[in-house]
Amino acid sequence: MKILGIESSCDECAAAVVEDGQRILSSVVATQIPFHAVYNGVVPEIASRKHTEWIYGVVKEALDKAGLGPGDVDGVAATAHPGLLGSLLVGLSFAKAFAWARGLPFIAVNHMLAHLYASRLLNDNMEPASSVPADRADVPYPFLGLLVSGGHSIICRVDDFDDITVLGTTIDDAVGEAFDKVSKHYGFGYPGGAVIDKLARSGNSEAFRFPMPKLDKGEHHYDFSYSGLKTAVINQLEQFRVANGGEKAAAGMEQANIAASFQKTAVEILLRSLFRAAEDTGLKTIVAGGGVAANSYLRARLAEQQDLRCIFPPLDLCGDNGAMIAGIGYQYLVRGERSPLSVTASARVGGFKRRYP
């Protein structure tokens, strides 16, 4: 069964064709980064307008690369939530119209569940992650999920492709959002996650000792907070500098040191809660997904854990893409589920963020 997947939840206009929920026949991602870089962040109005301009061409290219015509696919899947509402509506509306015109089954899916599914996809042309075992497409349930992106930071127990229990989440900023805001403040560049990751490789992660949040009220044992770290890096930098003869590093090295020290603390905040969850649940397999899953420090730290099996998608599938939408869409469709064409988009999903205490 060949499924067309369409993803437009933020600033990536993407479409893909996946066969039998696993084999990627094509994957096209049209990035809007140049249009948002001048603002150091995604502008929702620009994002939705670009999706409107590009969606037809992106879907056609995905079909062409798969060697298929519009009548050769067996179903259509599209992101319905969470994300930017205007952007979501473009991809969702196009997908519904495509399915209606061809008389195809249609399914609306959760973007974050699709990120968890991404590691099950196979494409010999994509770069494999070094920590991914050969049988990563058949990871048995249950396992721990680590969903990390610009909008979400979630630790969850995963019992099926669409059955998760959120154990921990952010009480304020998501980890990817913190990367973007720190990068914007210091003028490192956009997108912040990729820029800081690259810059940090030449920096000293011990140059600054930033604080770790302490969440000890109520049921927040596995939760995260990034507002304090963001404030420390942006507004209180000198308070956390490790003494080095009383002198700052040269300008270029100073930036690299800030990036490396921030990145280390940001990732360690994630790992502290993740390792707690692994110990308490007894689950030894961790599957990561989302844009921050491409972070090299996060991957390296998890690769060090000899008692845990840590699985990442290929780098190409960490960011938003249509293949993960098509892959998880297949699972719903073979189970006999369909979405009505009256389904609409929603910006948020309940339970993905919490308040403190």
Image (cartoon, grey):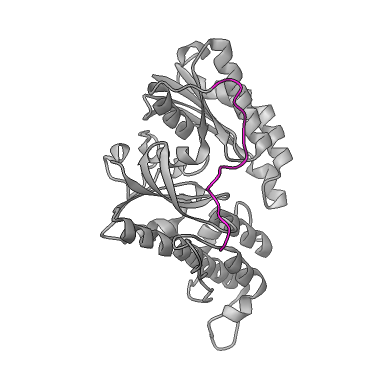
Q: Could you say where residue 106 lies in the image, as x and y percent from the top left?
A: 51, 21
The residue positioned farthest toward the front in the image shown: 218
* Residue 65 vertical placement versus 188 (above, below): above
Q: Residue at x 56, y 58 (%)?
A: 171
Q: How many marks?
A: 0
* Residue 287 vertical placement versus 357 (above, below): above
* Residue 24 vertical placement versus 296 (above, below): above
Q: Quadrant location of residue 173?
A: bottom right
Q: Could you say where residue 125 lies in the image, as x and y percent from the top left?
A: 39, 34
The answer to whether residue 14 is visible is no
Q: Could you say where residue 203 lies in the image, as x and y percent from the top left?
A: 51, 69
Q: Nearer the viewer, residue 243 or 142?
A: 142
Position of the C terminus, as image quadrant, is bottom right
Judge left or right: residue 20 versus residue 175. left
**Main SS class of the magenta portion in the image:** loop
Q: Nearer the viewer, residue 254 or 44?
A: 44
Q: Quadrant location of residue 302?
A: bottom left
> Is residue 34 shown in magenta?
no
The residue positioned farthest toward the bottom in the image shown: 245
Q: Residue at x 53, y 40 (%)?
A: 320
Q: Residue at x 51, y 76 (%)?
A: 209
Position of the N terminus, as image quadrant, is top left
Q: Nearer the viewer, residue 222 or 130?
A: 222
Judge left or right: residue 33 versus residue 278. right
Judge left or right: residue 224 versus residue 177. left
Question: Which contiguous range is marked in magenta?
Answer: 340-357
The answer to whether residue 119 is visible is yes
* Residue 275 vertical placement versus 119 (above, below): below
Q: Could you say where residue 117 lies in the image, as x and y percent from the top left?
A: 41, 38
